[in-house]
Amino acid sequence: MAMMKRSSERFGAGKRTRGPRDDKFRPRKRSRFLEGARDIDLNDTEFLRRFITDHGKILPARLTGATAKQQRLLRRGIARARMMGLLP
């Protein structure tokens, strides 16, 4: 009777090769929409348009570089502008 290999041996666990990205840690590049802005003006629709896509979805903070507090303010401002009919 032949012995069965362990599941880790069958699926190649432990034989991980290093990829080109494993050599160095590269920090994620972020676009900084809020870099020059100190205050978030919720009535400025041109400013708020930078944080939504063409389809009207709000961009996530990991793409915009906003902090959690700034992202909450942006979400609230965009929602209010939509209710007033200023944004799609």
Image (cartoon, rainbow, N blue to C red):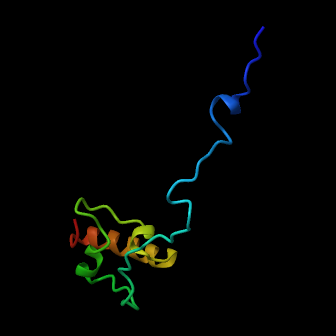
Task: State whether residue 30 is above or below residue 88.
Answer: below
Q: Residue at x 22, y 65 (%)?
A: 88
Out of 18 and 75, give the one closest to the viewer.
18
Q: Residue at x 38, y 83 (%)?
A: 34
Q: Residue at x 45, y 79 (%)?
A: 70
Q: Is residue 54 above or below residue 65?
A: above
**Image quadrant of residue 82?**
bottom left
* The residue positioned farthest toward the top in the image shown: 1
Q: Is residue 84 left or right of residue 20?
A: left
x, y percent for residue 47: 27, 81
| Residue 76 on image: x %, y % | 39, 73
Relative image position of residue 17 (x, y in whole percent): 59, 48
Q: How many marks?
A: 0
| Front in this rendered view, residue 80 or 52 | 52
Q: In this rendered view, identify the residue nearer to me: 36 or 23.
A: 23
Residue for point 40% across, 69% down: 63
Front in this rendered view, residue 68 or 81: 68
**Image quarter for residue 49?**
bottom left
Q: Position of residue 1 (x, y in %)?
A: 78, 8
